Image: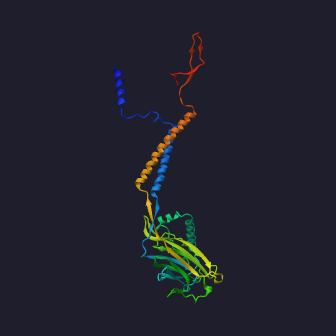
């Protein structure tokens, strides 16, 4: 009797237990369950690692607005080598208001036009980068994020002493112009002021000495930012005729750059090139030289480097872990169900014949009936 009371008391205590019991099938260790667990934890580790790399990375956000700054000056940074002697060429700027800007900030340096082997290697590398930038515009974001960290984009100095005569002229420096459309040009003769604009003293220079083959080592607008490669950097043109005109049509876009390394106000630009031979007899009129006609865009671009916030990284991480747990559980159950169906492991009952007696005393065991209390 005591044993009976004790058993009833234990059953009552079990029924009063508020915590649900886990079925034994849930804690049963199987080879398939272990395999699924290994796959799930491996996938979670890999996805969590990839998500951490995404969290560490940054991206550039572009915003556009109207440029309301019209009173400030625009800086033009120039480094161009022309295959003519310095006393035969002159450079200046004439804006849309017919205002000639003083070129006091430019220096004329006699040099050799041909590059040294080290400089030629640098030039080829720069051209390779320019070609990749034209094909894949997303590389510009990489340049924005690597400013002040990459190698300098200026032409390195010569490592040897040239033996050739200094027959070329390197024009480098900077100018401050009004924020209106203008024309920066390099042509024959020094510029002189004129009541109707300006003129160049080209009468004393022979046409046989005209050679406007040139190399643009650097051309930028606004504040110089180390590491930024501009569209015309590394451009090299070789003349096929003495009287030849090179034209560059440039659209300048004001740009504010805000990264974790630097904040600067600079300018980007796009360019269209054209060149032709001056032949008045054939109707091709003009003046031999290098002409860069620029125009200022009314829109300003703000480029900001952004980073994923910590709370978003944690939410995405929790989503990865929970999603893999749920998905692997459903897949494991589905695969197990399919295996049971294929292998006929469902035990719905056992069919066996049941003996039926007739009044004449014969037995008939040919009627298969499903027994109610069948044993597996």
- Is residue 190 something that shows in the picture? no
- Is residue 210 something that shows in the picture? yes
Splitting the image into 4 quarters, where does residue 292 fall? bottom right
The residue positioned 59% from the left and 12% from the top of the image is 362
Splitting the image into 4 quarters, where does residue 363 fall? top right
Total number of numbered labels? 0
- Whether 308 is drawn above or below 24: the answer is below
Point out residue 187 in the picture as x, y percentages from the top left corner: 56, 83
Farthest bottom residue in view: 204
Point out residue 23 in the picture as x, y percentages from the top left corner: 44, 33
Which sits in the foreground, 22 or 306? 306
- Whether 250 is drawn above or below 12: the answer is below
Farthest top residue in view: 360
- Whether 80 is drawn above or below 63: the answer is below
Point out residue 214 in the picture as x, y percentages from the top left corner: 57, 78
Point out residue 216 in the picture as x, y percentages from the top left corner: 55, 75
The residue positioned 51% from the left and 39% from the top of the image is 332
Quadrant holding the N terminus: top left
């Amino acid at each position: 009797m005591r044993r009976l009371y004790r058993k009833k008391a234990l059953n009552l205590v079990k029924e009063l237990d508020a915590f649900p019991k886990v079925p034994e099938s849930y804690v049963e260790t199987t080879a398939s369950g272990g395999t699924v667990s290994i796959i799930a934890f491996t996938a979670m580790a890999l996805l969590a690692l990839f998500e951490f790399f995404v969290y560490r990375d940054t991206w550039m956000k572009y915003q556009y607005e109207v440029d309301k700054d019209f009173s400030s000056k625009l800086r033009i940074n120039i480094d161009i080598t022309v295959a003519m002697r310095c006393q035969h060429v002159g450079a200046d700027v004439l804006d849309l208001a017919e205002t000639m800007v003083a070129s006091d900030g430019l220096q004329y340096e006699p040099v050799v036009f041909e590059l040294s082997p080290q400089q030629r290697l640098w030039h080829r590398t720069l051209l390779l980068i320019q070609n990749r930038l034209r094909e894949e515009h997303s590389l510009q974001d990489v340049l924005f994020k690597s400013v002040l960290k990459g190698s300098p984009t200026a032409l390195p100095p010569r490592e040897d002493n040239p033996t050739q005569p200094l027959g070329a002229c390197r024009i480098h420096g900077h100018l401050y112009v009004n924020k209106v459309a203008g024309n920066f040009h390099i042509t024959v003769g020094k510029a002189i002021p004129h009541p109707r604009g300006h003129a160049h003293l080209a009468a004393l220079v022979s046409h046989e000495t005209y050679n406007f083959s040139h190399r643009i080592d650097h051309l930028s607008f606004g504040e110089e930012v180390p590491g930024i490669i501009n569209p015309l950097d590394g451009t090299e043109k070789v003349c096929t005729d003495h009287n030849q005109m090179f034209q560059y049509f440039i659209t300048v876009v004001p740009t504010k750059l805000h990264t974790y390394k630097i904040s600067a106000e600079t300018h980007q630009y796009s360019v269209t090139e054209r060149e032709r031979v001056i032949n008045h007899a054939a109707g091709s009129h003009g003046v031999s030289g290098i002409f860069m006609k620029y125009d200022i865009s009314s829109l300003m671009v703000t480029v900001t480097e952004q980073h994923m916030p910590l709370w978003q990284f944690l939410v995405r991480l929790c989503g990865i872990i929970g999603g893999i747990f749920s998905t692997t559980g459903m897949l494991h159950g589905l695969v197990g169900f399919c295996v049971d169906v294929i292998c006929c492991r469902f035990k719905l009952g056992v069919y066996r014949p049941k003996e039926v007696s007739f009044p004449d005393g014969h037995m008939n065991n040919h009627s298969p009936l499903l027994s109610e209390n069948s044993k597996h």
